[in-house]
């Protein structure tokens, strides 16, 4: 037999191809500068961090660098891909790539092989601080006083305070709150004096700046970029009482069960301590309670289950006896969530894909993400009941099953707002019925374990969608606060408000808007969520752009900026 010889040249391309090592993609470089926003001064020792988005290679972590004396930074050897990029420095508010203000909308940075991105500028805002001392009625410093900076917040049309920062005074009565955003804050000092025994008849009531015990009389403290604002407090004793009551529960005799009684002030939600529980007799006593509005809460834990009872309480100048708390396991609320309708075009913002739900399918058409009612998996929706007051007693979010059924377990007595988490852009909660009661606007109430029936939720895929540009002197304006405010008849419904910040091109986008009449405002600067406040809005009524949203509406609008220096007329 004669073998056939093939030319070696036929094998060379294959051999060379098999032996040729894979050429790695060319590394990338990021460089730029960090500046102080108020002066343009270069910032030394700022830390720049680049974090890969998606799967990282083994051993790969965030890339970081420090700025030099000229505020310059250089990150080298980065693999091509998409990154989150942010800058931090002590004494300044952190800033991410693409953000106009801290905590504002940002962007991801995409790097092509071998790309050198060299035009990055980060303008960091100096953090503010509030500092001072707390004294007693004799001018002596007090240690262990909790000092808080509060912001005004709004829940279903009601004003309340929300803590922004807090600390305790040291042995010299000193405190210092740092890292504050430029904003208006309401300051309070809260002190529970050590128990002096049966003879104690005085306590220190919470004090609000400029020296009132009434939270409605609190005055704002304005903190600018880099400001250090001195605020001292003097605490004065007021008559104090005792609150006594009974906990009715068979579990009190079980040593394995945990028991706790809390007294909470309604206006802020902070605890009033010094609670004593006699498990053998099932009684409790709370000492040194100054006058005010409270909620008393009893909690019992046993075998992984929680039993709760709570009761509103008005405290005056006399001791209170005879409170009876019967902790119960809470109610079980069964419900169903369904999705109807089809959405219009979804958001084109860079963060739109993050709205996709596990098990949800979306299509990308002409660079725009679309969701439809047929391809959103109801098993990815989370249902939550949120307390309508500040007591930290609520329920955990639950997932619906594949048929849209869900069960909320151990729901304590109280009033709740219903919400559905993680809806895609332009989907919204259209209807909520608890038995025959419409609870979408007014919320639902669980009273002594009694529930009127199932909780039925309906999601619409056709929420309204607004996008546009904010203009000042015929030029787009970045970092403007754009607020969509419902008409005067619906101002008490927090869920109807929307807020967006304009990007560097003055562009904004709002989605998932329920039908109705609205007014669209754009401010250069607005204090926190002041647009919820009717008193704040009153001077601007008619200055916004009126819009009527129907199901599936899409509008492109241009809005004139309301400048920060403009005096209210």
Image (tube, rainbow, N blue to C red):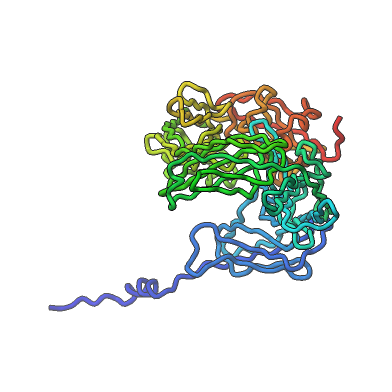
Residue appearing at x 71%, y 48% in the figure: 200
In the rendered view, would you say 219 is above or below 518?
A: below
Residue appearing at x 62%, y 45% in the figure: 286
Residue that protrudes farthest toward the left in the picture: 1
Q: Is residue 474 visible to us here?
A: no
Q: Is residue 54 visible to us here?
A: yes
Residue that protrudes farthest toward the front in the picture: 199
Q: Can you give x and y, in whole percent of width and height, for residue 226 in the image?
A: 81, 56
Q: Nearer the viewer, residue 220 or 13?
A: 220
Q: Can you give x and y, in whole percent of width and height, for residue 377 in the image?
A: 42, 39
Q: Quadrant of the C terminus?
A: top right
Quarter of the rendering containing residue 76: bottom right
Q: Can you give x and y, in whole percent of width and height, for residue 89 in the image?
A: 72, 63
Residue appearing at x 21%, y 76% in the figure: 4
In the rendered view, would you say 134 is above or below 487?
A: below
Q: Quadrant of the N terminus?
A: bottom left
Q: Nearer the viewer, residue 16 or 335?
A: 335
**From the viewer's perspective, is 314 left or right of 422?**
right
In the rendered view, would you say 133 is above or below 248?
A: below
**From the viewer's perspective, is 403 left or right of 535?**
left
């Amino acid at each position: 037999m004669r073998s056939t010889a093939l030319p070696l040249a036929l094998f060379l391309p294959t051999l060379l191809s098999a032996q040729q090592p894979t050429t790695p993609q060319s590394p990338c470089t990021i460089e730029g500068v960090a500046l102080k926003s108020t002066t343009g001064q270069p910032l030394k020792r700022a830390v720049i961090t680049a974090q890969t988005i998606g799967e990282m290679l083994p051993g790969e972590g965030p890339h970081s660098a420090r700025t030099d004396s000229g505020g310059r930074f250089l990150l080298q050897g980065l693999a091509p891909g998409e990154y989150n990029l942010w800058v931090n420095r002590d004494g300044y508010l952190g800033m991410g790539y693409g953000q106009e203000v801290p905590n504002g909308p940002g962007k991801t940075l995409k790097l092509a092989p071998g790309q050198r991105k060299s035009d990055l500028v980060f303008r960091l805002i100096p953090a503010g601080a509030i500092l001072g001392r707390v004294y007693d009625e004799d001018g002596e410093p007090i240690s262990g006083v909790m000092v808080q900076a509060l912001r005004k917040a709004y829940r279903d049309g009601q004003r309340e305070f929300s803590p922004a920062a807090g600390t305790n005074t040291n042995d010299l009565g000193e405190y210092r709150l740092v890292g504050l955003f430029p904003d208006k804050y309401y300051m309070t000092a809260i002190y529970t004096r050590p128990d002096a025994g049966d003879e104690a008849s005085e306590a220190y009531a919470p004090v609000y700046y400029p020296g009132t015990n009434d939270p409605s009389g609190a005055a704002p403290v304005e903190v600018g970029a880099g400001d250090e604002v001195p605020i001292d407090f003097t605490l004065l004793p007021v008559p104090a009482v005792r609150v006594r009551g009974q906990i009715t529960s068979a579990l009190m005799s079980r040593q394995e069960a945990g028991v706790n009684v809390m007294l909470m002030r309604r206006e802020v939600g902070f605890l009033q301590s010094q609670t004593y529980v006699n498990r053998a007799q099932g009684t409790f006593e709370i000492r040194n309670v100054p006058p005010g509005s409270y909620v008393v809460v009893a909690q019992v834990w046993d075998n992984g289950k929680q039993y709760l009872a709570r009761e509103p309480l008005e405290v005056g100048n006399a001791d209170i006896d005879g409170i009876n708390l019967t902790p119960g396991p809470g109610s079980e609320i069964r419900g169903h969530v369904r999705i109807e309708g089809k959405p219009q075009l979804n958001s084109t913002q860079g963060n739109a894909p993050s709205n996709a739900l596990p098990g949800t399918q979306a299509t990308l058409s002409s660079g725009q993400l679309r969701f439809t009612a047929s391809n959103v998996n109801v098993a990815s929706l989370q249902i939550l009941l949120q307390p309508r007051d500040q007591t930290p007693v609520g329920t955990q979010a639950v997932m619906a099953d594949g048929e849209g059924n869900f069960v909320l377990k151990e729901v304590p007595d109280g009033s709740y707002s219903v919400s559905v988490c993680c809806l895609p852009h332009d989907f919204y909660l259209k209807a909520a019925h608890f038995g025959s009661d419409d609870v979408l606007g007014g919320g639902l109430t669980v009273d002594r374990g009694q529930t009127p029936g199932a909780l039925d939720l309906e999601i619409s895929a056709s929420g309204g969608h607004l996008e546009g540009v904010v203009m000042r002197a015929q030029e787009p304006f970045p970092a403007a606060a754009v607020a969509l405010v419902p008409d005067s008849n619906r101002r008490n419904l927090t869920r109807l408000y929307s807020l967006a910040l304009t990007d560097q091109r003055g562009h904004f986008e709002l989605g998932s808007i329920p039908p109705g009449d609205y007014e669209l405002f754009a401010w250069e600067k607005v204090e926190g969520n002041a647009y919820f406040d009717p008193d704040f809005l009153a001077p601007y009524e008619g200055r916004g752009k009126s819009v009527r949203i129907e199901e599936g509406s899409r509008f492109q609008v241009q809005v004139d900026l309301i400048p920060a220096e403009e005096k209210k007329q």
